[in-house]
Image (spheres, rainbow, N blue to C red):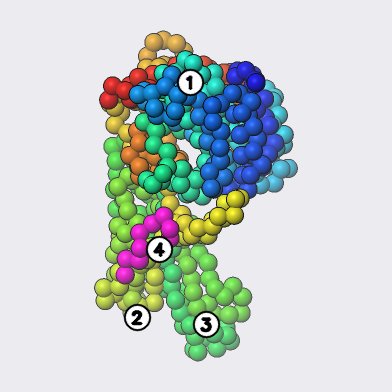
């Protein structure tokens, strides 16, 4: 059996960086993480149907959740974003190189470095934490959080008392974030040869009215005192057929919508329809504007035609996701938002346990993330108290300069040893 340590966690993180793990391709990484958990003496290690890996370090009572003390779940995700052209990196993206006091490479801070720290911390706390520690690293976080949605499903899923997400916070305590939803506005026309435009109806003719409506929508977004304003922007236009000598019969405008907790797919689609309707009507677009959201993790078709002009469809974007275990599901591209009360006892206990890096006795800063995490599923959807803590600077995420400062990582490892027992005690007194 291996002993948990910070140096061991760094070596483990280097191994993880050397294993590419795009969404749906996490199998080799899952096996490496499970092997580390077993070597560290976890009481139970398994993978679920989608291939997410779960390890358990039991508290003083034996079975998970059976000792009367709150259960804390530590979680990072297994998948990563693509590295792009390796020639554009200062250090090779899959070497796990240490240079200049940093661990370099894709996943160094998002999120394989923090994943390695959480995995070793849980083993280091064996016999020291009163409650059980679940370490759950899910698949598909980068594409909407299918893995966490499944891990915490109401029927038979994990139900810890507290979740600590290991997305980088640069030593702060994160208490929430905006969510993200992709919305598609599809304009329909009639295809034809570009030499005879009078025989066709160009779907692209509707795009200017749609974009004007989206700009109107973007100008009247709601705001939260902590999370800030929601935002929506058009990020792509695709025309079908794609041949440049064919008049397209379908044009799709894709929106990236950073949403607030409480926003629903139905409400988002209704707001898009309301925003684009007057501009389509002003140009004499005939037919109807309707919307639907019909993937497995969203609501059923809303049927919102209501006498609106025809020819334009508003829908939540979906994709068919395939886990490396072979399971498939049509999923909305949706990451829910969430927000914990800054005064919640779990938040205040966490901030006090972490403190500041200068050691002046002040609690850690409490703030939201700028990006979405699996906390939207654990807290925003399932209602499980969720905070975030990990070393690393958000500005390096998804870049070709991704890195994790080793001095900060060592400090974060030590603070995790205090954080987990602190939030267990706080959860017990809530």
Q: Earlier in the sequence, mark 4 or mark 1?
A: 4
Residue drawn at (37%, 25%), measured in percent from left and top? 70
Q: Secondary structure at mark 4?
A: loop
In magenta segment, residue 417 = no
Q: Of tags 1 and 2, which is closer to the observer?
A: 1
What is the spatial separation of the Cα atoms under label 1 and label 2, in whole angstroms?
A: 60 Å
Residue 85, position as x, y percentages in the image? 69, 46
Q: Badge 3 is on which residue? A: 191
Q: Earlier in the sequence, mark 2 or mark 4?
A: 2
Q: Badge 1 is on which residue? A: 416
The residue range painted magenta reads 295-303
Q: Are marks 3 and 1 in contact (CB under 8 Å)?
A: no
What is the spatial separation of the Cα atoms under label 3 and label 1, in whole angstroms?
A: 60 Å
- Relative depth, front residue between 54 and 228: 54
What is the spatial separation of the Cα atoms under label 2 and label 4, in whole angstroms?
A: 25 Å
Q: Secondary structure at mark 1?
A: helix
Query: Chief secondary structure of the magenta span?
Result: loop
Q: Is residue 140 above or below residue 265?
A: above
Res 88 seen here = yes
Q: Of tags 4 and 3, which is closer to the observer?
A: 4
Dot 1: within a 10 Å radius of its alpha carbon, few (fewer than 14), some, or many (20 or more) residues?
Answer: many
Q: Would you say 10 lies left or right of 300 here?
A: right
Residue 125, position as x, y percentages in the image? 50, 18
Q: Badge 2 is on which residue? A: 286
């Amino acid at each position: 059996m291996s002993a948990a340590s910070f140096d061991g966690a760094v070596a483990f993180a280097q191994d993880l960086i050397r294993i590419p793990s795009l969404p749906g391709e996490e199998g080799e990484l899952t096996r490496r993480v499970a092997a580390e958990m077993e070597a560290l003496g976890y009481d139970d290690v398994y993978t679920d149907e989608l291939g997410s890996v779960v390890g358990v370090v039991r508290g003083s009572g034996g079975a998970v959740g059976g000792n009367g003390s709150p259960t804390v779940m530590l979680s990072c995700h297994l998948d990563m974003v693509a590295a792009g052209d390796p020639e554009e990196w200062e250090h090779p993206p899959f070497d796990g190189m240490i240079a200049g006091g940093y661990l370099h490479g894709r996943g160094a801070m998002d999120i394989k470095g923090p994943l390695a720290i959480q995995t070793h911390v849980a083993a280091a706390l064996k016999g020291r934490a009163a409650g059980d520690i679940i370490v759950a690293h899910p698949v598909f976080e980068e594409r909407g959080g299918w893995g966490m949605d499944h891990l915490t499903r109401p029927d038979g899923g994990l139900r810890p008392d507290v979740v600590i997400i290991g997305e980088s916070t640069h030593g702060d305590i994160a208490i929430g974030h905006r969510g993200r939803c992709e919305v598609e506005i599809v304009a329909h026309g009639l295809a034809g040869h570009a030499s005879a435009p009078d025989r066709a109806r160009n779907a692209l003719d509707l795009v200017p009215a749609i974009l004007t409506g989206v700009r109107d929508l973007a100008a009247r977004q709601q705001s939260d005192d902590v999370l800030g304003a929601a935002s929506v922007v058009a990020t792509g236009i695709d025309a079908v057929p794609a041949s440049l000598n064919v008049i397209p019969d379908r044009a799709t405008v894709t929106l990236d919508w950073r949403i607030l907790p409480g926003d629903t797919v139905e409400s988002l689609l209704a707001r898009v329809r309301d925003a684009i309707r007057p501009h389509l009507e002003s140009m004499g677009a005939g037919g109807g504007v309707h919307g639907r959201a019909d993937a497995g993790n969203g609501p059923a078709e809303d049927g919102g035609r209501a006498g609106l002009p025809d020819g334009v469809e508003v829908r939540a974007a979906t994709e068919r996701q395939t886990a490396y275990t072979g399971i498939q599901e049509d999923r909305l591209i949706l990451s829910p938002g969430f927000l914990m009360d800054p005064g919640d006892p779990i938040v205040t206990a966490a901030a006090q346990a972490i403190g500041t890096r200068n050691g002046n006795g002040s609690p850690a800063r409490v703030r939201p993330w700028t990006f979405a995490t699996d906390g939207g599923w654990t807290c925003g959807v399932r209602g499980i108290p969720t905070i975030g803590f990990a070393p690393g600077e958000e500005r390096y995420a998804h870049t070709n300069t991704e890195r994790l400062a080793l001095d900060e990582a060592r400090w974060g490892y030590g603070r995790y040893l205090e954080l987990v027992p602190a939030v267990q005690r706080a959860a017990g007194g809530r």
